[in-house]
Each structure stands twice: as structure tokens, then as C-alpha cells.
Amino acid sequence: MIQKFTSKEIHFLRTGSDGSDGAEPVCPPETYLSDLLHSPSVQFTAFEERLAQALPPKDRFTAAVVRMDPCAPEKQREQAGDIFEACFNSVLDKKRGIWESLDPTTFVLVFWDYDNEKDGIRLLTLLKKKISDQLKAGLLMGVALYPFHDYSREKILENALKAIDHAAFFGSDHMISFDGISLNISGDRLYQLEKFDDAIQEYEKGLAIAPKDINLINSLGVAYGITEQLDKALEYFEQASAINPEEVMVIYNIGLIHRINAKDDRALLYLKKAHGINPDIFEIELLLGYLLFKDERHDQAMPHLDTAIRLNPDSGTAFRIRGQILLDKKDNAGAGTAFNMAVKLSPNDAAALSGYARAMALQKKNLAIALSFARKSVSLDPENRLFSARLEEIQEIQDQAMAMNQGKTIKSA
């Protein structure tokens, strides 16, 4: 039987989709302007309507979304609209394009009447520089061209929004043209919003542009994995592995698919290979430690769990598995310490509560608390026979302790 996971419980590996190759520090934007495609503002809808009427019957035009830092000083934000309009008119004028303010710091434009793609990019670069110089602030710009691959004219605005989200990964003052990486980022955003079917469509569009992009292939595999289409997920992970057999995220993801399919021996092979390539990835160390624990190879599991805890000290799961191993080794005090951390980090982890209760009971310590934790574990997972057996055992230990105390009280009296 295949174990089912939610998007929060499963941990496929995905890399950053910015395409920077480590050339400079990048991070996801706080605000994704492509969200306007799902929840359009009044301003965005108004511009879409204008654009539908204004696009000329030409073969070539360009869209761009321009944004200054929304946290810029108030004076800059107040000047942004007037400066954008003046610069737009000086470079393009109303006969060659249209523009709209989406908010006080974000502007969208479409223009035409240029000879070739190089000339269009030159005009945009000039416009960006003029606005930036007058505002004395860096600007993000996302650009989309038509024609581009098999995209229709109506998709140009949508593509420009995805391009500026791509640019935002690089911080201020970057200009990015829409490409396969932009679609990877758009797909990742939809994945984040748990719109998995839409994310799959974005990754597939990205692969139509960049068919050998390993990040896109892996992302598509992850999206299929999270929707429990495991055969398709494995197909894409293996396709990515064929491009780069040493790509650690792909090796791990193949191992995870085998784990979900209860093929633990094969999962271990891939996880050990992934560990050999990079021994400092939390997900790899945690799953490898778990599988070795499950296989009763406790001494081999421990170093991986210790590494997982070092890499992510907020992982209740790693502490819980460590506690279970120490409990099996009859190190009740050590188990209690590990389970204590697991329960602090995950108060409703039934296995951690049950294990902690037993560790305390075997030490004859805090029996009232142990009984309370054991009862809670059973209430959280009433079908678990181990938790129920532990509850009975702890109840018996407490009863014996109470009887002994009563006997001592009678004898002393």
C-alpha cells in the first residue's frame, strides 16, 4: 500500500529556480505580481481592456512591468507616477504605446513601432535608465516580447508579469526577459499556493522552451509526486538523472519515490549515493537515518540523525527517531531527553508523546506526567496498539508505585 502524504508532510527537494547558478545572492520576492493573474486588481483589469483595443495589427510589440522599491522614501513614491509618464512620453509617446499605473510604485506598458527585437530592448533600456536616474532609485523590469515561441498576442502581459517576478529574485535594478526560468518560478509560485495542476502546466510550458533544463524537469517530477502520480514523477526524475547523474536533489527524489512505494532497499541505495555527494542536506540525512533505524541498524542511523539535528535543530521528527533508538538501547535517560525535545517541537506527535511517557515510566520519574502523555498519544492515534500497550504498562507502573507508597505510609504509622 502506498503511503499518502500532504504537501506539508512530503519533502521532495527543489532548487531555487532563479537560474543564477550561484553567481550572486538571490531570494524569492515578498510579493509576486503574477498573482494579479489569479486575483486581478481594478487597475490591472482596466489595462487589459485598454490593451485589447489598442494592440495594433503588427507582427511585433513588447510588454514590460516596471517597479520601484515599495518601501522607498515617501518623496520618491510620490514622484514616481509623474516621472514615469514624462519618461514614457519622451522615449515612446502615446502613438507608440500605452501604459498604466498598477499601484503607486508599479507600472505596466506595451509599445510597438520598432524595427527589430534589438531596437525594442534598446528603447526599454533607455526608458529604465531615464526613470531610474530621475528617481535616483533602482528599478525592476520584466519584459515579454511578441512573437515568442507559440504564445498568442494575448499572453504578452501575462508573460511580462512572470518576467518581473523572475527579475525580483535578483534584488533591485534588474531587467529580465520572459523565458523558461520565468515559467519555473511561476510554477513554483503556483506550487506554493497548492495549485498543483496549474503548476504542472507551467513547468510543461517551460520545458517546451528549455527542454533540457534540469530544474524544470525536477520541478515537474515533484509536482507529479505531490499529486501522487508516482510513475510520472519517477519518469521525470530519471530523465533529469540522465542529464546529470550526480545531481543530488534528483537522486534524493528518486530515493523518496522508492520509499513511498515501500521499496526501502532501493531507497537506501539512492539515499546513500546522495549522502556521498553532499552529506549536509537535512532531508537526505533525516530519511537515511529513518530507514536505517527502521532496518534496525541503529548505530548506522545515529550519525545521520545527529547531522539532521545539526542542520535543522527544529526538527521534532529527528529528535523523536533518536529517542526511539535510545529507548531500544535501554538508555532511558537519553531517550527521555530526545523525546522531550521532540514533544516541545511537535506537541501533538503521538509517537513522541508515547515514547517520552515510556522513557519517564521506566525511570520511575514523573509518573503522573507520563500517564498524561500516554493517554494523549492514544487519543491522537486510538488504533495504535503499541501506544495502548504502553498506556497499560505505565498505568500498571503507577499503580505499583502508589501501592508501595501506601505500604510505606502504613508501616511508618
Image (cartoon, rainbow, N blue to C red):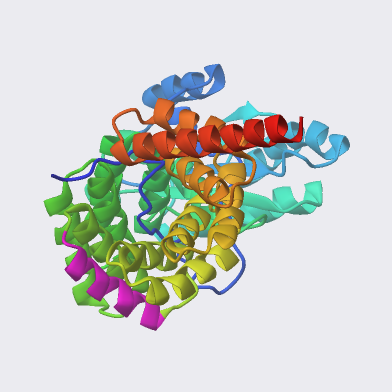
> Residue at the spot x=37%, y=83% of the render?
276
> Residue at the spot x=46%, y=58% of the render?
327
Q: On screen, 344 above or below 125? A: above
Front residue of 216/131: it is: 216
Left or right placement of residue 17 versus residue 214 in this view: right
Tell me where the magenta segment starts and ends, as one range.
263-277
Front residue of 160/332: it is: 332
Residue 137, position in %: x, y?
A: 77, 51
Q: Answer with the quarter of the image where residue 272 lies.
A: bottom left
Residue 49 visible in the shown view: yes
Q: Main secondary structure of the magenta part?
A: helix
Residue 237, position in %: x, y?
A: 22, 63
Q: Answer with the quarter of the image where residue 173 lies.
A: bottom right
Magenta span contains residue 114: no
Front residue of 304/59: it is: 304
Left or right placement of residue 410 versus residue 93 in this view: right
> Residue at the spot x=22%, y=53% of the render?
260
Query: Where's the C terminus, which quadrant?
Result: top right
Q: How many marks?
A: 0
Residue 364, position in %: x, y?
A: 59, 47
Magenta span contains residue 274: yes
Q: On screen, 129 above or below 254? A: above
Q: Answer with the quarter of the image where residue 261 lies.
A: bottom left
Residue 94 visible in the shown view: no
Residue 239, position in %: x, y?
A: 18, 67
> Residue at the spot x=31%, y=67% of the render?
296
Front residue of 409/96: it is: 409
